[in-house]
Amino acid sequence: MAERPRRDASDVPETPASGEPAAPAPEAPEESGNRLLSTLRGMLLPALALLAAFAVGAIVIVISDFDLLGQWGSDPIGAIGASWSAIMATYGALLRGSIGDPGALFGALFSADWEALRRAFGPLSETIVSATPLILTGLSVALAFRVGLFNIGAEGQLYIGSLFAVIAGFSLVGLPWFIHLPIAVGAGFLGGALWGFIPGLLKARTGAHEVIVTIMLNFVALNLIGWALKTELVQREGRSDAISKIVEPTALIPALVQGLRAHWGIVIALLAAVAVWWLLFRSTKGFEFRAVGFNPRAARYAGMSIAWSTVLSMVAAGGLAGLAGTAVILGGSGTLSPGFSPGYGFDGIVVALVGATRPLGVVAAAFLFGALRAGATPMQAATGTPIDLVVIIQALVIMFIAAPALVRAIFRIRAERRTAEVFAKGWGS
Amino acid sequence: MTAAAAAHVMTRAERRLRTRQRILGIVYLLLAVAMVLGFGVSVADDASSSFGLTAPTAPIALPNLVIPSATTAYLLAAVVAFAGAVQLTRGFGTRGAIVLGLVAFAFVFAFLTWVAAGQSMNLTGLLETTVQRSVPIAFGALSGVLCERSGVINIAIEGMLLSGAFVAAVVTSAFDNPWLGMLSAVVMGGLLGGLLAVLAIRYRVDQIIAGFFINIFVTGLTAFLSVRLLQPYQDELNRPERLGPIAIPILSDIPILGPVLFNHNIFVYLLFGLIAVVHFGLFYTRWGLRVRAVGEHPKAADTVGVNVYWVRYTNVILGGMVAGLGGAFFTIGSTGGFEREMTAGRGFIGLAAMIFGGWNPIGGFLAALVFGFADAIQSRLSILSIAIPSEFLLMVPYIVTIIVVAGLVGRARAPAADGKPYVKE
Amino acid sequence: MSPEPSHVKLELRGITKRFPGVVANQDVDLVVQPGEIHALLGENGAGKSTLMNVLYGLYRPDEGEILIDDKVVAFDGPGDAIDAGIGMVHQHFMLVPVFTVTENVMLGVETTRGPFGQLDRQAARGRIVEISERHGLHIDPDATVEDLPVGVRQRVEIIKTLYRHSNVLILDEPSAVLTPQETDELFAVMRSLVATGTSIVFITHKLNEVLEVADRITVLRRGTVAGTTTPDETNLEELAAMMVGRDVQLVVDRPPATPGEPILEVRDLVVRDERGHNAVNRLDLAVRAGEILAVAGVQGNGQSELVEAITGLREPDAGVVLLAGEPLADSPRDVFEAGVAHVPEDRMEDGLIADFTVADNLVLNSYWQPPFASGLRLHGEAIVSNAETLVGEYDIRTPSIFNPVGNLSGGNQQKVIAAREFSRPIKLIVAAQPTRGLDVGSIEYIHRRIVAKRDEGAAVLIVSSELDEVVALGDRIAVMYRGRIVDTLSPDEATPERLGLLMGGAHPEDDDAGTLVGATADTGSEQADG
């Protein structure tokens, strides 16, 4: 962790390095302490960021439609209406694809027809399936952020965890599910934890910047998986492509409801969120993590070990990411192939940022982005808008979240007193 | 200070250095052992490796280089062992980096000899492919150098490459003019550089987050537009003319090195040119001195009247332009049409190459060659039916980068103010 | 050939500069004649650096003006000041470590040749060599700055200013990083410079130097001019009095100390700082139970390093630190467990975590112990009740114990630290600048608490550059100068003059004012393997 520069023994208080005007030095006024108001204010910026992102997304929808653009030239008034319906249609399809059609939902509930219920709750189920790994990778990145570390390696940790889980899944035969499944899940955690341990250790001992190390390890993991899936141990019999053996049924995570894809992995994810919350806010280690993340100097002065916090948090973060992959595989196909993750690890970064690195926020953000992902395919089917719109919106959300000054400039909000968090302190230690 | 205290302090400061030297020496020795066992013993005594030295297009056909496989391996292993012994005991001081390079070369050559044992392998072709594969990485590394030397971390190289590829393909197709395509790719890269600069310098957004945002945004936008625009209008927008290889008249006929270096398309020559220009600029001109000062100690530069913000803005935009140009290589410089996410992480590898190469243009290029070499050789391996899984070879450059970043082979010195926003008082 | 510097007269008239909460300079007048060495004398907080930053264009004065040769000038930044012929050698060097001397000197005013702005290092090098020879500033133009010892780096900074044709040179505490021999060399260089017409403003807190080399002296105290004089017209005692003033001291009502066993013993301590300098240079001190030892001294004489060595934050390079007869542990947590309370000098950077609540900060070093935790589990109720008790006991003004401590006023923040550190059984208190930046009420409160702990039997070591505080609290008063304790006084002996002399490096017993304490046994800094 980079040391803050030592203060000069000068006569004058230094202006703090932040984008906001300097806080008065010795006599800072005490806050009015209205908790509800400050919580709401805290939610205001992320909400506005979302709004801004969707607004820009709307612009993209309109601009990329050549016919619509043509209409602006020839019939501007009509074009406004047409644009609005295009935007509403797209976002509407997105919404219906992720949560479901309210009419169908109500109808199915009252009709007590199993088929109708299944179809009506389909979108919601897809959202849950999408959200499950995002909760876990979001927690992974958020936990590391709390200690001041940038875990870009969730993707790699996820893959290694999946590998361990799958191996535990198909190589242990004849165990009852209540023994086999926990072992497989545990193996998944272990794999990810191992892949998080490496950058943690390197950072603690040598100061190697975790961004580069984790990015490199992502590539190493991908290659490792590619190789492993072609070895005799792992590769499925009779196949020559990179695909693993299928795990035993006793290692599969059961579905929540028969016929829908949503599975108990969501419970694992939610439990993990609780566990992370407990770790961060109710345990001694979490106390240290947060202290080191906020002010490593003071943490050191208070006797805490920055090295241990670094290593432990990366191990935990890696394990969480490993669980993400495990949940997807054991709750889905039961087999591992490269590319099964559409970037859950990187999405975790977005989720962690939008969720303000709080476990509760991460869960909410994960559901939001899970909904976006789930609804993207139906949206494309219904309106022809490519699913990548969702990626664009995601990117915009990041930018607006990370640049509060930008959002404030757009919406003309007064500056708060908090200083901007800066993670990037250069590559060295 | 008493002599005892002085000696005590001496050891404390230098102990770590000595340990690193010793570890490196042991590593060399272990390498030598590995070479003997792996490349020497495992090969039949009479096997010889045949290296083709003629490129397919060369007018002069050179005889193959045939060397006894096992003996070569033993010889090279002996060289490495010797280096290891010296490193363990005395260390090489300032020449350590050169020795490291030599050891690496010896190892790699022994490896190639082993691969080609009893068979023939076209060395020139391999080297040519190496250069090909390393081009986008080298562009990425150069872009990174421009940005980071002024103190701004550029994670967005990936996005800049991708945007350059997209724009080059589309503009070239639409206007049937590859030069216009190249130019627009440069402009696009510059725009993204400008965006990064504004976010990082003016709004003091964390540079890594800002870079990530640009990557994700560009990935999403290009994929989106690829479906929305390129698929329906395939012929008009995504069938660009590709720039073919241009053989430089006399130089490309030089045996072995000729075709490797001088028979590529314009991008490679531009790359060479840019590397030379940037290297010269950074280390021999007033501009470069100021840039480096800003990257190392912006406050010192500020107090002598250098405009830190201006320097950072221009450098990041220039870096973006270089990356944009590099991106154009993916489409009009090689495959032609744009495909989503076609850069496949090359921007990040470029970053790694920059670090590996010590934050300078030539080093970055050499490092990119290493990555390119790994890429080139792993595709050969399956042809030569060699036992080593290609994935392990691909892993090597990444692992090496980790080792470099961890300072295990000497500190990789980033510009001291890299990543820290500068606040003028 | 560089032209001779022109002889300019520099004047600062009525300069006032305010910052939030403090007036750094109030109506300051300063006149520097051409070819004169003008010393600006004062202790911490006197406003010297601020004044010079105003002169150098880094700050804009709120009132007052700068005149060069009787013409008013205004600076928008260092560039303007440099153009006007003012050069500054900062206390913390503005040198790029990986560049050579030549590159550092030419940065910003590079000599180039050819169409591409190619650096002409040879030309620059030539000029540098010429300047260095003319003034006896020996350097190797091709050396890399980070390899150079500190004294040589200073020469590079001086050459930087001369290279830019400075007429007025500002030296900010130049001898802080030099050995006595190097300081003598520096003075020789200074005399050579003024002989060619350059004027020098030289900022210091060291009385001997002022008398030795200055032509005229301006003394600043608390932002205003306390007096202007020349070496002929004054002496050490008078300067000392002007520098520290005869303010009425804060008197802390306290019973006399009843010291017991020695708790803290420091012998022959050597601690190097980041620059390779011996910040603490064979220092001895001892503090007994039930007494307060107050260490006075201008900041920068090794106090920070001393405190770090005693609190386990920095490993000493030599010497012994004993706590109640046992060698002191080397990690902050072990030191804490041994019963040492540490009040760090920078409460926001080192003592508190601004984003943590008051309650959490109150257990910042004890959260892992029962009753606040058992194993991994934190006991929130214990932490809360602890906070409630302490907030009441120490009268910490906060709307809630869940308020982030960064929102509290300075005084209350310090109370949080005091509450945390003093509310457990402790043998030793180490407090560095305990009342810096606090209002009078808070200062009084903290002082009372410290005395209370002393009366309970704790040994107290206070390091402070506030003379009032030192005199008010100390049962014994030591003065630290250049990494050593130069003398220890009883409260009666600690007159402002005596203290000022000691802090300024003049041992009253020496009749030869030129002898710097600590010059005999060893040299102040070994920059051997920095």
Image: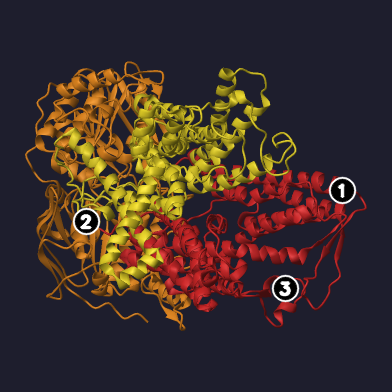
Chain colours: A yellow, B red, C orange
Among numbered discs 3 and 1, the one appearing first in the sequence: 1
* Left/right of residue C509 with respect to residue B252 in the rendered view: left
Instruction: Residue at 22%, 34% (x, y): give it.
Output: C405
- Which amino acid lies under the numbered mark 2 shown in the image of this protein? Ser
Q: Position of residue A325 (x, y in %)?
A: 53, 36
Residue that numbered label 1 is attached to: B43
Q: Is residue A295 in view?
A: no
Distance from disc 2 to disc 1, alpha carbons, whole Å, reads 74 Å
Residue C504 drawn above or below residue C59: above
- At which x and y percent is residue A336? 61, 38
Circle 3 crowding by C-alpha within 10 Å: few under 14, some 14–19, many from 20: many
Residue A192 visible in the current orientation: yes
Q: Nearer the viewer, residue B30 or B140?
A: B140
Residues at badges 2 and 3 in contact (C-beta under 8 Å)? no
The residue singled out by tag 2 in the image is C49
Dot 1: what SS?
A: loop
**Pick the front one: B108 or C349:** B108
Say which element carries label 2.
Answer: helix
Image quarter of the N terminus of chain C:
bottom left
Label 3 secondary element? helix
* Residue furthest out toward the left: C248
Give amino acid for label 3.
Pro
Check disc 1: other Cα within 10 Å, few if <14, some if 14-19, many if 20+: some
Q: Read off the chain for label 2.
A: C
Q: Is residue C223 left or right of residue B18?
A: left
| Residue B259 tag number | 3
